[in-house]
Image: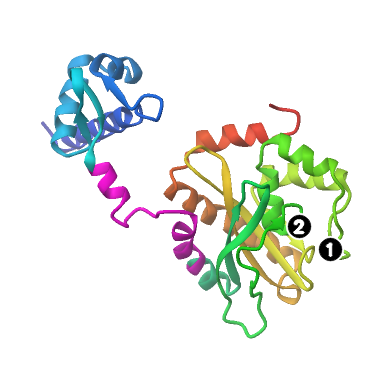
Amino acid sequence: MQEHEIRRGSVQSIDRAVAILRCFDACTPDLGISDLARATGLSTSTVHRLLLAMQENGLIRQTAHRRYAIGPLVAQLAHSGGIPAGLREAALPVLRALRDDTEETAAVHELLPTGQRVVLDQVESRHQLRRTYTEFGIPVPLPLGAPGKVLLAFSPWERQADVLAAPLAQVLPATITDPVVLAAQLAEIRTRGFAKSMAERTPGIRSVAAPVFDFTGQAIGCLSISGPELRMPEERLEELGERIVPAAWSVSELLGATPAARDRSTTRASAGIH
């Protein structure tokens, strides 16, 4: 057998093992060989062979009545520190890279169950004149600023409708207070993948933000880049927006997000689709 055929067979085995692992979730924590064969489209003999190898490596364990469940190695990896424990831990290395790349302050924000958001952490610009967050842990309404707008844009439509139906507070002259204008911005944000703020929450500060998704496809937070207006003309905001989208997605992948789950969630966030 030639080398490329051996390599192709090895890759196929990995693909099949991953397909088996994906069959397990909270609703189906243990499965039989026939269940796995039906779910993956593989033969029972192939599934049995793969399960034996996966069991030897701790990826799968056998339970009662010849059924199988996720193995101890997965839990060990999850608790070893190699896999980030949460949004802040996953985001920090990416924030440092964004700060170094853009020379502006990069921050991570978390969506609260209350429908507000908080600043979790930041990596500050080295410029003397820079954006510095000071209100860590203090809830901020979603319509205010790029981080809030991007989280609102990717929230379920019912939450967006509630926000658009309520009075929109004007914090600064540039704050969006017209629900029609805000609704149009939210639709554009979903299309482009990032939000912009033109000094709408903090005087003299402009920012861009992109969402971070978890394994369910829900937007649970976002990354932002912000700086003083004099360094943030419109064309630079556009450039920074294009940079922050893949950076935020890299954090999403660390938290288990997949494009399919993200797209389903985004569809539900679109106006009029439930």
| Distance CA(mark 1)–CA(mark 2) | 8 Å
The residue drawn where x is 67% and y is 36% is 156
Is the stretch drawn in magenta largely helix, strand or loop?
helix
> Which quarter of the figure is the C terminus placed in?
top right
Looking at this view, is 64 or 260 the one in front? 64
Q: Secondary structure at mark 2?
A: loop
Residue type at mark 2?
Leu
Looking at this view, is 206 or 32 the one in front? 32
The residue drawn where x is 71% and y is 27% is 273
Label disc, if present, on residue 197 of the rendered structure: none
The percent position of residue 189, horizontal first and vertical second, equals 70, 47
Residue at image mark 1? 171
Query: Relative to 152, is 47 above or below?
Result: above
Is 90 covered by the magenta stretch? yes
Number of on-image labels: 2
Q: Is residue 109 left or right of residue 11?
A: right
Q: Is residue 36 visible?
A: yes
Near mark 1 (Cα within 10 A), the count class, few <14, some 14-19 or many ≥20, is some
Q: Are marks 1 and 2 in contact (CB under 8 Å)?
A: yes
Q: Is residue 96 left or right of residue 8?
A: right
Looking at this view, is 238 or 226 the one in front? 226
Near mark 2 (Cα within 10 A), the count class, few <14, some 14-19 or many ≥20, is many
Q: Quadrant of residue 203?
A: bottom right
Instruction: Give the colouring mode of the picture.
Output: rainbow
Residue at image mark 2? 144
Q: Quadrant of residue 90?
A: bottom left
The percent position of residue 250, horizontal first and vertical second, equals 47, 52
> Which quarter of the figure is the N terminus placed in?
top left
Residue type at mark 1?
Val
Highlighted magenta segment, given as a residue range: 73-96
